[in-house]
Amino acid sequence: MSAKPRAVRGMNDILPEVAGTWRYLESIVQEIVESYGYAEIRLPLLEYTELFKRSIGEVTDIVEKEMYTFPDRNGESLTLRPEATAGIVRAGMTNGLFHNQKQKLWTSGPMFRYEKPQQGRYRQFYQFDVEAVGYDGPDVDAELIIMSARLWRRLEISKIKLEINSLGTPETRLHYRDALVEYFSGVKNQLDKDSIRRLEQNPLRILDSKNPEMQAIVDAAPIMLDYLDEASAEHFSYLKALLDAAGVAYSVNPRLVRGLDYYSRTVFEWATDALGSQGAVCSGGRYDGLVEKLGGRATPAVGWAMGIERFVALYEACGGEARTNRVDVFIAALGSGTLARAFVLAEELRDSIAGIRVEMNLGGGSFKSQMKRADKSGAEYALLLGEQELADKCIGLKPMRSTDEQKSVALDELVATLAEKLR
């Protein structure tokens, strides 16, 4: 006997018992972002590797260690997307979406990073991504944050807090970088290996260290907000005023950074302590330098991305109800001529009652076995069609989730009866 096929490590199956919750939550996010005027864009999973080297940067963990990269049959290097923002910008530039235009876009789907699999973190993971390109004011930054706050309220997720910061312009960040290099070089003998490496490559990433032994050193480092230029300070002040007016609570975290050079001004993060060490659920920021870095005109842009695995876990941790793929009605047929009539009846119900979910008993079986399948389906009602019911032009209506008694309903009254009960 040959061995059973194996799943690729870190590639997680989303099974039917949880897929219903995923679909429900994804539909809520889609409904909310589209209510703000954002339109869907669908992207390929594969891009030329050069896109991510140019956008993310060659000297980053993502590019150096985590990307799934391989040559195609023409010898060109392709990469499974590790994130969505670069793909959205590439698609906009390729298709002329940013030429004298502003775009509000969203996308969702799988991303790929080769890292150690753990609870809630997989090598194939899913993200929901929202981007606004061509907008330069703090008003769109505020809108994106207010939009995400609406999502938490809609789903009654309370175990989450907003942190914001400003990174200023690339020019002011250079001055800040010099200050960090000077400071961390003075305490270099106290830095861990990761921080020493980052000191040479990107000292801002030291501020993001998760090593508890580094916290006192990080806390004493210079603060980015002290180095902001006047325009960035005004931008940040106006953002806070808009959030205050909208009643969105936040805290300013001067240690909240992004390690990529094209980020500027606003950065924000929705974090939770309900999932252990996995703090961030939704992260965003302004990336005014990315389009230009990829060869286009200087174009302001801002967006956020949310890991769907963590989103689902947070929803469940906050007491969210699991959404299963239950049906509304299960039709059981027993006896000569009943199955054909049951099929017609199922189609009539689907035609007449919008959104109704009807499952037919398939494969025959005794009345008892069909009732077991009806119960397992999670149906609210079972419809029982036997030879006598067929002759009398009626059907048995059996409640499956209550103690109400079974009753007989005329076939020509069934649609109206079920529509009323399922309303």
Image (tube, rainbow, N blue to C red):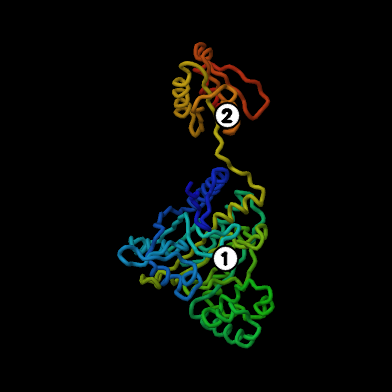
Residue 41: x and y in percent read: 41, 55
Between the C-alphas of marks 2 and 1, the distance is 48 Å
Indicate whether 420 appears above or below 226. Answer: above
Q: Is residue 423 left or right of residue 350?
A: right
Q: Is residue 308 left or right of residue 58?
A: right
Report which residue position mark 2 lands on: 374
Report which residue position mark 1 lands on: 268
In the picture, residue 221 is in which quadrant? bottom right
Of marks 2 and 1, which one's residue comes earlier in the chain? 1
Residue 233: x and y in percent read: 56, 74
Query: Residue at coordinates 52% horizontally, 71% vertically from top-left?
Result: 265
Dot 2: element:
helix
In the picture, residue 280 is in which quadrant? bottom right
What amino acid is labelled 1 in the image?
Phe
Quadrant where the image shows the C terminus: top right
Query: Residue at coordinates 43% horizontally, 53% vertically from top-left?
Result: 39
Q: Nearer the viewer, residue 403 or 9?
A: 9
Query: Residue at coordinates 49% horizontally, 71% vertically from top-left?
Result: 263
Say whether marks 2 and 1 touch (CB < 8 Å): no
